[in-house]
Image (cartoon, rainbow, N blue to C red):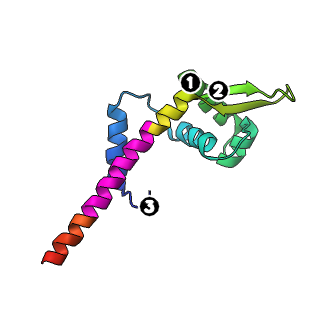
Amino acid sequence: MGTLSLAGWNRALTQYVRSGAPDLTNRQMALLLTVYLTPGPHTVRGLARKLDVSKPVVTRALNTLGTLGYLKRERDQDDRRNIFIVQTQDGAKFLEKFEAYLGQQENGAVKQRSEERVFIAAE
């Protein structure tokens, strides 16, 4: 994704907004991506530490993401006192679509630079 410019991000986010998918805050998106992209198990305390925010911030974001079905709380079977934050199928589908929006913009940026090189070489 190193090739994606701010304009590319803008186009990807515009596509996402138009998709009808629920709007997520930056905190919610950061929490979702952290759970999906970093190894678990994940707890509210651990996520708060990783994101450098308070536990209530994580809890509020998790409540919304749980309502949307993107993440869920699951009790640890070995120690019933622990609650893990786990991925869901709906959350994975959401992120696949979001990644596709970014990929379309990234591919367009690579193609545009390639066309610019051809144009410059032809001059």
Image quadrant holding the N terminus, namely: bottom left
Crowding around mark 1 (Cα neighbors within 10 Å: few <14, some 14 to 19, many 20+) is some
Q: Position of residue 106 (x, y in %)?
A: 36, 54
Name the residue tied to disc 2: 72
- Magenta residues, dominant SS class: helix
Return the residue found at the far left.
123
- Left or right of 117: which side holds 13? right
The amino acid marked with disc number 3 is Gly
Disc 3 to disc 1, C-alpha distance: 30 Å
Circles 2 and 3: CB atoms closer than 8 Å: no
Q: Position of residue 122 (x, y in %)?
A: 14, 76
Q: Residues within 10 Å of mark 2 (few under 14, many from 20)?
A: some
Q: Which residues are magenta?
A: 97-113
Q: Position of residue 71 (x, y in %)?
A: 61, 29
- Disc 3: which residue: 2
User: Could you tell me which secondary element the residue under label 3 belongs to?
Assistant: loop
Q: CA distance from mark 1 to mark 2?
A: 7 Å
Asked whether 16 or 100 is in front, the reply is 100
Label at residue 69: 1
